[in-house]
Amino acid sequence: MAIDLEPSWLKVLQGEFEKDYMIKLKKFLKHEKDAGYKIYPKGADIFNAFKKTPFDGLKVVILGQDPYHGVNQAHGLSFSVQKSITPPPSLKNIYKELATDIPGFTIPNHGDLTEWAEQGVLLLNATLTVRDSSPASHQKKGWEEFTDQVIKTISDKKEGIVFILWGAYAQAKAELIDKSKHFIIKSPHPSPFSADRGFFGSRPFSKTNEILVKEGKEPIDWQIH
């Protein structure tokens, strides 16, 4: 596992890669690979969220749980899939909400959210790898410790960040965030199992932009091209 982080992230997270949990995690991933399992996303994309969204330009965090576990889906950004892949159900629901929340938003024909990441939206999964066709297979192996540290680091070292937490799993991470200097937007998860229970109509995207404008920051252009 090559540690390929953008320099402003490396500066604040460098120490994590020497810790015991990370050394164990690297051994686990090597063992998975040696055993012949296919791991997603590919090695070069594992830290994609950090490459596309520098720490210095961070404005918003959208927290997911696991990478997608199907062929060519995951590419290191939560909820996002590679351009050639049909958007999964949760992402389709995110697009539906955008179409009612953001005037003029048109639903794109792909699910690659890189344009958000490049504007300062950290698309962070709690677990950064998964075994092919085996959801949750890399949970509790060390990734959560790393991504919890990422959230704490953002909370400690930044101000005025908008955290979008969908569903109970993401909302449990609110305890890592200093609410006196950051903003938290919560709703049910966009999954088909829960979207009708309050995700639809929650308007997270326009709320985020209202906060950013009040904070003197450029709003996000949510339209995917």
Image (cartoon, rainbow, N blue to C red):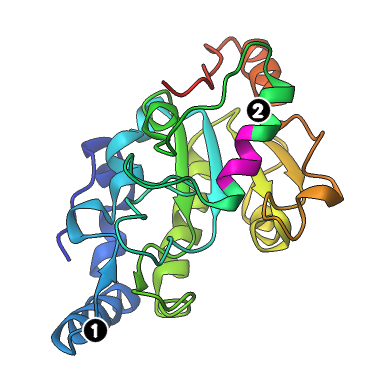
| Relative height, residue 57 to residue 137 (above, below) | above
Q: Would you place residue 220 above or below residue 44 in this image?
A: above
Label 1: which secondary element: helix
Crowding around mark 1 (Cα neighbors within 10 Å: few <14, some 14 to 19, many 20+) is some
Q: Main secondary structure of the magenta part?
A: helix
> Looking at this view, is 103 or 4 the one in front?
103
Hey, which quadrant is residue 194 in on the image? bottom right
**Residue 110, horizontal then vertical, whole percent:** 42, 35
Task: Say few, some or many: other residues with alpha carbon within 10 Å of mark 2 (under 14 / 14 to 19 / 20 or more).
Answer: many
Amino acid carrying label 2: it is Leu
Q: On the rendered structure, is 105 left or right of 113?
A: right
Label of residue 98 in the image: 2
Q: Which residues are magenta?
A: 91-95
Of callouts 2 and 1, which one flags the residue occurring earlier in the amino acid sequence? 1
Question: In the figure, is residue 134 to the left or right of 37?
Answer: right
Q: Residue at x 66, y 63 (%)?
A: 169
**Cα distance, mark 2 to mark 1?**
38 Å
Kindly identify which residue carries mark 1.
Answer: 32
Residue nearest the observer in this picture, 190 or 118: 190
Given the image, on which type of amino acid does mark 1 rest? Glu
